[in-house]
Every structure is written in structure tokens, then in C-alpha cells.
Image (cartoon, coloured by chain):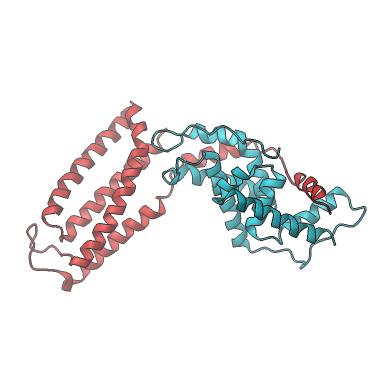
Amino acid sequence: MAGEVLTPPIEITATGSAPWPAFEELFHIHGTRMKSIAYNLLGNQQDAEDAVQEAFLKSCRSQHNYRGGAALHTWVYRILINVCLDEGRRRQRRPAMDTVVEPRSGDTPADLKFALRHALTQLPRRQRAVFLMAAAEGLPHVEIAAILEISEANSRTLLFDARRQLQGLLSK
Amino acid sequence: MTPDELDALARNLHHEWESPELLPRIAAAAQSRPRPHRFVFWAAAAAAVIALGLYMLPKAARPVAPVSANAPLLDEQALAEVEAAEAAYRKSIDRLARIAAPKLNTANSPLMLAYTEKLALLDSAIGALRGEIDRNGFNTNLRLQMAALYLDKQQTLEQVLHHE
């Protein structure tokens, strides 16, 4: 999945707006991945679906803010990430434990996944978003950079830092 | 944990589930009336508050009033503020009009034709009022009338955009 081209850009009208069928197509192509990103940022399916819905609605309703230079899906991903990070900020939910669950030899894959989810909550939000998009969802850095409006080099750096921190948290 | 092990574990974070109701839910919500754009709202609110505030302050009034002898007047600074807010509001509405233009140009239902006609009337009224404001820019009542016309135009364009 890593490095794949996400999708051909969806056609935008001359006015810079996208008709509803374009959003519908976008949902069919990216909906599953968007839900997964939101799930990993928010922690449950219901909140993830709500975030995806909000991202699509915000995109639809503020098309005048859409800059034609970016692909439509990039823009909707960006809104989704912001929705999820805003929601996370609003909740201010942090794990009760100060340290994450550390995997031991013989831990099951489910335990390791649980530990990784906890470790992710320790990362700065942007690092967490980059790690999830790159390592969990396989988005290429060029897409992540466009989504977060950062350089590709910055995206790579954030991923490197995230990996290093996660390894530290999980490898004691 | 090695980097490869971490990457393999990270790929397992991808989580899929069926949610057949989500797209219909989004479509239904998208078709419902949206809240006005925040910038437009605040631009309109700013223009209204400034105009109303000046209306309530007799000391801001000047004795020259070609349109109405009793109409309240703006001072120079307030005029500049109102014009800036109005220009920003007008720009937002023009952007909205550009987005709605393809729909208006291609639709031929009676309702859409009525919208087109109403928008033409509003543009005509805005043009006429603009002429009066150019001659009497300090008159608060004219500014309020203009704000009302712009608001009507904004709402009409939003109705066009959300009409099936």
C-alpha cells in the first residue's frame, strides 16, 4: 500500500467548486481509509463516522475556500485530520496511565496493537497523524505533505521522529 | 522492537468496518440548509453593528442630508469601516454568485427561473441604491437598505445552491 497513488484527481468545475457526485465518488474511493484514520485518531467507530461526516459536510459547504491547486481528496483529508485533532483537543482525553503498556516476549498481536495504540496517544498530534497516514494507511509522503500543508521533507522528519519515539516506548 | 516490526504492527492498525448508512446520512445532511459562512456572518454583523451604533449616536450625525433631513449620518472613520465591511461582504456574495452561476445557467425549472429573475431584480436594486450611496455616502439608512439587499441576495443564492 505504501507509496501508492491515491486516485486520479476528481474533476472540478471552472468555478472551482465540486458537484455532489464528486464527493460521492470521493467517499467510495477514500471512505474506508478516511474512517480508519479517524478511528485511530478518535478511538471508536461512531466518533470516526461522525468525523468523516463532518469533514464531507464542511468540504461541501465551504467549497468557496477550496483552492483549485490541490486535489479535492487532499482537501477533504485535511479537513478530516483537523476535525479529528480538534475533537481530540476538545476532549482532552489522555490515557489514565502515565506510561504505555509495554509488550513482552510472547505478547499476542492484539496485545502489541493495544500497546501501539496507547503509545500513539503519547505522540504530538501532528506526528501521530503522519504516522497513521504513512505507516498504517500507506499514504505516500507527497500526499501527506499536501494534506497537512507541510513539505515532504517535514513529513519524513515527523515520521522518523514518531517511529523513534514509538520504538522507545515499545522496546523497553 | 525493530523498525520493520513496528511497520508491520502499524499496518495492523488499519481498521475496516461496514457502514452502509454513512453516505446516505452525509448526503441528507449536505442537502439540508447550511449555516451562513462564518466570514459572511461576521461581515454582515459588523456592518449592521457599526451602522446601528452610529444610528444611536446623535453626536455622529451631521446636519447635511440630501435624501432625508432626519436620516442619521456616518462620520469619516465610520464610513471607511462600513465600506470595508461592505466590500468584504460583497466579495463573498460575488464568490457565492460565481459558484451558483453554472446551476442558474443550466437549470430550466420554474423555480430556478424565478430565482434568476429575483437575482436580476436584486442586482438592479443594488445598482440603483449604489448610485444613491455614491451621492450620499454618509447616510446610514441607505447603508442599512444595502445590507438588507445583500442579505436577500446571499439567501437567494444559497437557496439556488441547495435546490435539487
> Relative to B145, is B28 on the left or the right?
right
Outermost residue toward the bottom in this view:
B59
Q: Position of residue A146 (x, y in %)?
A: 55, 46
> Relative to B157, is A42 on the left or the right?
right
Q: Position of residue A79 (x, y in %)?
A: 54, 48
> Relative to B42, is A71 on the left or the right?
right
> Relative to B65, is B19 on the left or the right?
right
- Residue A45 versus residue A85 in the image, above or below: above
Which lettered chain is shown in cyan?
A: A
Outermost residue toward the front in this view:
A153
Quadrant where the N terminus of chain B sits is: bottom right
Tell me which residue sits at (60%, 61%) in the image.
A89
Tell me which residue sits at (25%, 53%) in the image.
B147
Do we see residue B126 in this rendering?
yes
**Residue B135 found in image quarter:** bottom left
**In the depicted view, which residue is nearer to us: A154 or A42?**
A154
Do we see residue A54 in this rendering?
no
Quadrant where the C terminus of chain B sits is: top left
Q: Position of residue A148 (x, y in %)?
A: 57, 50
Tell me which residue sits at (13%, 49%) in the image.
B131
For the image, the number of numbered tags is 0
Tell me which residue sits at (36%, 53%) in the image.
B40
- Residue B49 versus residue B159 in the image, above or below: below
Which lettered chain is shown in red?
A: B
- Residue B122 versus residue B87 in the image, above or below: above
